[in-house]
Amino acid sequence: MDYRHELKFLVSDAQLEMIRYRLKLLMRQDLHQKDGIYTVRSLYFDDFGNSCMEENENGIDNRRKYRIRIYDGNDGVIKLEKKIKCRGMTRKVSREISRKDCLLYMSGRAPLLAPDSAELEKELYAEMKMSGMKPVTVVEYERCAFVEPRGNVRVTFDKNISGSEAIGHFLDKKIMAVPLLPKGNHVLEVKYDELLPEYIAQALEISVLQRTAFSKYYYARNYKQN
C-alpha cells in the first residue's frame, strides 16, 4: 500500500451525527461493522527510551509505531501492524498472527522467527532485542466507517476512546479502560490517496472543523503518566 493523506478532526456529538447522516447518502458503510459500528482494540509498543512517546510529543514527522489489533473483542483474527508517518502522509503494514504469538508479545517476549516469518515480524523481533520494544498501553474505541472507491477514501468516526494499563487482559472479551477525551468529544479521520472528492469534502465541511494531531496512543500514555 502506498502512502496516504490522513486528516484528523475533533467533533462533537451533534457534528458527528450531522456528518454521518450526509455520508450515508454518498458513501458505502464498511461491510465489517454490525449495526453501523465495531470496536477496535490496539496494544501499542514502545522502547526503553519511550521514543514513540517522545516523537509524538515533539511532533517529529518521520516516525513509526508497532501495535497489535483485534476487533469486537474477538481473538479469532489478530493483526500485528506497523504504522509509518512520513512527510505528513501515512502507510500501514499488517500481518495476521496467531493467538500464541500474541500472548508472547503481551508478555514482552518476541516469538522465535521461522523461515517464513514476514519482514514485519523480523523488524519487531530486532526492535525488541536491541531497543527493548515492548507493549506499554491498550487503546479501545467504537468506530463507524464509510468508504468510497474513488480516491480510495475512508472516513471514520471514533467514539468513546479509552485507554488501559491492563496489557495482560488485551485478549479478553471486555477490558476495563478510562476515557481519554471529555464526554461528547470524538475523533473524525479522513484518509485518501491523491485527492479527496469535492462532494465528500463539502459533506464533511472540513473548512469549519477543528483540525487536530490527536494520537490515541499518546493520550493513553499521557494519562498513565499523570
Image (spheres, rainbow, N blue to C red):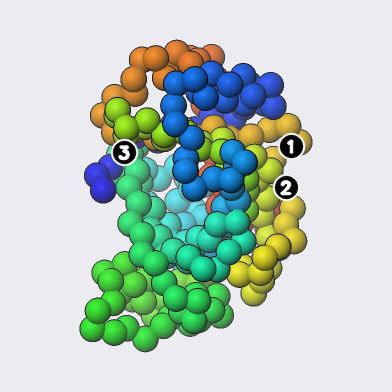
Q: Is residue 124 above or below residue 71?
A: below
Q: Residues within 10 Å of mark 1 (few under 14, many from 20)?
A: few
SS of the residue under disc 2:
strand
Q: Residues within 10 Å of mark 3 (few under 14, many from 20)?
A: many
SS of the residue under disc 1:
loop
- Mark 3–mark 1 Cα distance, whole angstroms, equals 29 Å
Residue 200 in the image: state x and y as whole percent.
42, 19
Q: Answer with mark 3 or mark 1, whichever residue precedes in sequence.
A: 3
Amino acid at dot 1: Pro
Residue 158: in sight, yes or no? no
Residue at 72%, 47% in the rendered image: 179
Residue 139 in the image: state x and y as whole percent.
61, 55
Q: Are marks 3 and 1 in contact (CB under 8 Å)?
A: no
Number of on-image labels: 3
- Mark 2–mark 1 Cα distance, whole angstroms, equals 7 Å
Residue at 76%, 36% in the rendered image: 183
Amino acid at dot 3: Arg
Q: Which mark is residue 4?
A: 3
Residue 136 in the image: state x and y as whole percent.
57, 66
Residue 199 in the image: state x and y as whole percent.
39, 14
Q: Are marks 2 and 3 in contact (CB under 8 Å)?
A: no
Q: Which residue is mark 1?
A: 182
Q: Answer with mark 2 or mark 3, whichever residue precedes in sequence.
A: 3
Q: Are marks 2 and 1 in contact (CB under 8 Å)?
A: yes
